[in-house]
Amino acid sequence: MAADPTDRVRASYDAMAERYAELFAGELEAARPERGLLDCLAEACAALGGPVADVGCGPAQAARYLRARGLPALGVDLSPRMVEVARALNPGLDVRVGSLTALGAADGAWAGAVALYAIIHLDPRERPLAFRELARALRPGGWLLVSFHVSMPGQPPGSAIDLDAWQGVRVNLRGHFLAPDVVAAELAAAGFAPRARLERGPWVEAEVPSLRCYLLAQRGPG
């Protein structure tokens, strides 16, 4: 019997945790397009009050960035080992185990959420569930920023890539390339109104050579 996809992702990021943190924990300290989007989200969420969650947080670089801007931020990640690494790198930051489809948050608990490249490992049938779960955890008018890979040479939107190794670490991961219009429609079906969209290529040479998309959306009033 094939391993459950969630179990595969969890085990892979457990194995990758230290190396992943080495590469990405400090990425927002340099000038990057994400910083502007996170600043926009931070200002919007500050007006609402309440915490902002970095979901699929990895080493919690987004949560750390938001906390430095005065927001009560927290991290959520599927991988227990990644959570341990994030806690060690960010003393005092609330980082907990959870998944996009089971956040462990009360209804309307958060003013905002960030999911940077977290949705790429979800099965297409799981994404609508994840977006509904995020809508549930956000208060009316709350904000969500998601990012994902759109395409790269040989990988059009709608395709997937399977990895059995990453940076010398054995993994079992599937990553999906997603069409922005499809993701926007799934967000709308979950009760979000897309407010802004940014597409970009690789920002630095070390990045995967993919086209990426960032969608900023707001939960409806209901």
Image (cartoon, rainbow, N blue to C red):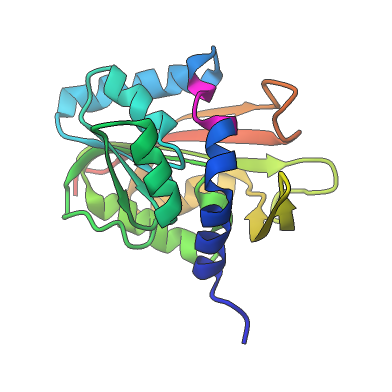
Question: Residue 113 is drawn in which quadrant?
Answer: top left
Asked if the stretch drawn in magenta spans residue 69, the answer is: no
Outermost residue toward the bottom in this view:
1
- Residue 217's place in the image compared with 108, above or below, is above
Q: How many marks?
A: 0
Question: Residue 98 is drawn in which quadrant?
Answer: bottom left
The quadrant in which the N terminus is found is bottom right
Q: Position of residue 3 (x, y in %)?
A: 58, 77
Q: Position of residue 176 (x, y in %)?
A: 65, 54
| Residue drawn at x 33%, y 55% as measured from the top left | 97
Q: Position of residue 123 (x, y in %)?
A: 56, 64
Identify which residue, 138 or 57, lies in the foreground. 57
Q: Which residues are magenta?
A: 23-28
Q: Is residue 160 visible?
A: no
Asked if the stretch drawn in magenta spans residue 27, the answer is: yes
Outermost residue toward the right in this view:
154
| Residue drawn at x 37%, y 23% as measured from the top left | 65
Question: Left or right of 165: which side holds 218?
Answer: left
- Residue 167's place in the image compared with 25, above or below, is below
| Residue drawn at x 67%, y 49% as measured from the top left | 177
Question: Left or right of 20: which side holds 104?
Answer: left
Identify which residue, 103 or 206, lies in the foreground. 206
Q: Is residue 8 visible?
A: yes
- Residue 149's place in the image compared with 97, above or below, is above
| Residue drawn at x 70%, y 30% as measured from the top left | 207
Q: Main secondary structure of the magenta part?
A: helix
Q: Position of residue 103 (x, y in %)?
A: 30, 56
